[in-house]
Amino acid sequence: FLLGMLFGIFIQSIFFHSSINPYNVKGPKVGTVLNISEVEIRNTVHVDDKGRPITKKQLLEPFVIPNLVGFSIATFLPGQTMMPMHEHESMHEIFYVLGGEGMFKIDDVIHKVSPGMLLHIAPGEKHGIWVPADADKSLKMVVTGVVVGEKK
């Protein structure tokens, strides 16, 4: 009987482990409070055709909250591009424009963006971003995303 209970607990731990059952993953037990002025600027993985990295202030690190790919303020300088277009298989990416102006190409449609605009890029939508070289100021955006489905 005892051996059967232990075996049952073992099987339950395998099938209901947090990596298999996402409903058990709740994230940190305490939240985060910070001031953006205390967050250092860092480079993203995206580099433009002149070798200049797109920069960000990372407010929440990726996956601190399950399925959330972070929360940051990204800055694109005049003349900077994030091209060629790319897509995400299982991520909804969200941009909210705080300042400046720029261009987004989503699939075959070009959108001129300015402060107050929100863009939701669904999984599979190809997208690219650029700021015209003659722009008066940098494009600043909140960037976040949510991963959905199972990782392949």
Image (tube, rainbow, N blue to C red):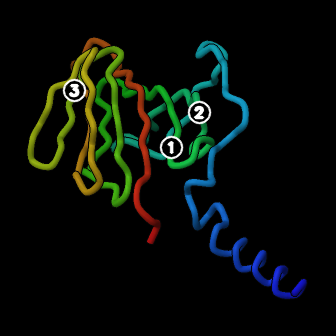
Asked if marks 2 and 1 touch (Cβ < 8 Å), the reply is yes
Q: Identify the amino acid type marked 1.
A: Leu
x then y, percent, for residue 22: 55, 57
Question: Which numbered disc flags the more N-terminal residue, 2 or 1?
Answer: 2
Q: Residue at x 72, y 71 (%)?
A: 13
Q: Position of residue 121 (x, y in %)?
A: 27, 43
**Mark 3 and mark 2: span between their CA atoms?**
29 Å
From the viewer's perspective, is residue 126 above or below residue 138? below
Image quadrant in which the N terminus is located? bottom right
Amino acid identity at mark 3: Pro
Crowd rating for badge 1 (residues with CA inside 10 Å; few <14, some 14–19, many 20+): some
Which quadrant does the C terminus fall into?
Answer: bottom left
For disc 1, the marked residue is: 68
Q: Is residue 87 above or below residue 133?
A: below
Q: Which residue is situated farthest in the right direction here?
A: 2
Q: Nearer the viewer, residue 67 or 82?
A: 67
Helix, strand or loop under label 2:
strand
Distance CA(mark 2)–CA(mark 1)? 9 Å
